[in-house]
Image (cartoon, grey):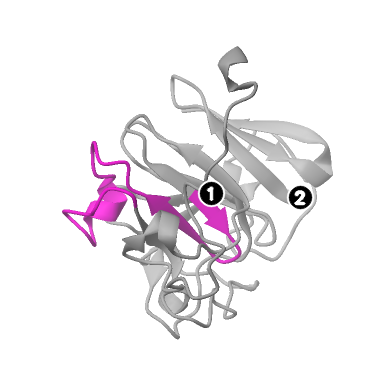
Amino acid sequence: ASQLVGGKIDIFAGSKDPNAPSTFDNVQADISRILSPNFMVLDADGNLYFSYGGGISVVYGGVKVPPILALRFPTPQKGFQYLIAGNLDGNNSSGPSTNLCTGPSTCGDGGPALVPSGAADPLNLPFGIAVDAAGNLYIADEVAQSIRKVSATDGTISTIAGDPKHALNGYNADNIQATSALLNYPSTVKLDSTGNLYIADSANYLIRRIDT
């Protein structure tokens, strides 16, 4: 880490060029615009995931294709950014979706995590994200008061903690099923080596854990 002192900074993803492409999908990441990033995480293969208002994108690292990305792009290009969750409204110059998940609603549970342009976005304000060894994606959706999971197998989204209708927040109990427990603006998630999921339950001033 000491080698970073005095190091040079450069753009990995995004562009300050006003004429840069703003499709946000299937485009070279370091010469195109990106949606405003909230949080980011690297997987073991060097793929960089980042969250923004309404969705999740990944910059392909060129080693191993993430399973979720492979569902749309089996042979993606190294250094390109791709939308993997949210709404394909982001795939145009108008920017991110405004048709966000709003409770009470299942917010697309059981359906695709990435929906066509014009469809209701399954996410609202995804912030902290984590990826497990199998490529499953975990999302702390602050405003939807829930933790969401995107399956690496088929790209479907589900709610694994918090109100399944994405409307209620607060604190009710512990030692109960995670989908029966209320959360209060969950901001980040983290996996340990055995697959337990830790949740920063911000407005409850708690760290919660879901055991495997």
Does residue 170 appear to the left or right of 76 in the view shown?
A: right
Does residue 134 appear to the left or right of 210 in the view shown?
A: left
Q: Magenta segment, which residues?
A: 50-79
Q: Crowding at label 2, few (<14), some or many (≥20) Cα neighbours within 10 Å? A: many
Of helix, strand and loop, which one carries label 1?
strand
- Residue 51 versus residue 178 in the image, above or below: below
Is residue 182 shown to the viewer in this render? no
Of helix, strand and loop, which one carries label 2?
loop
Residue positioned 64% across, 41% down in the render: 188
Distance between the alpha carbons at the discs numbered 1 and 2 = 15 Å
**Residue 54: x and y, percent?**
56, 66
Q: Which mark is residue 68?
A: none
Q: Which label's residue is closer to the chain start, 1 or 2?
A: 1
**Residue 65: x and y, percent?**
24, 44
Residue positioned 40% across, 51% down in the render: 58
> On the image, which quarter does residue 88 sit in?
bottom left
- Residue 112 versus residue 181 in the image, above or below: below
What is the three-letter code of the residue carrying label 2?
Answer: Asn
| Residue identified by numbered label 1 | 139
Q: In what quadrant of the picture does the N terminus appear?
A: top right
What is the three-letter code of the residue carrying label 1?
Answer: Ile
Magenta segment main secondary structure: loop
Residue positioned 72% across, 31% down in the render: 207
Is residue 69 shown to the viewer in this render? yes
Q: Crowding at label 1, few (<14), some or many (≥20) Cα neighbours within 10 Å? A: many
Indicate which label's residue lies in the foreground, 1 or 2: 1
Q: Which mark is residue 184?
A: 2
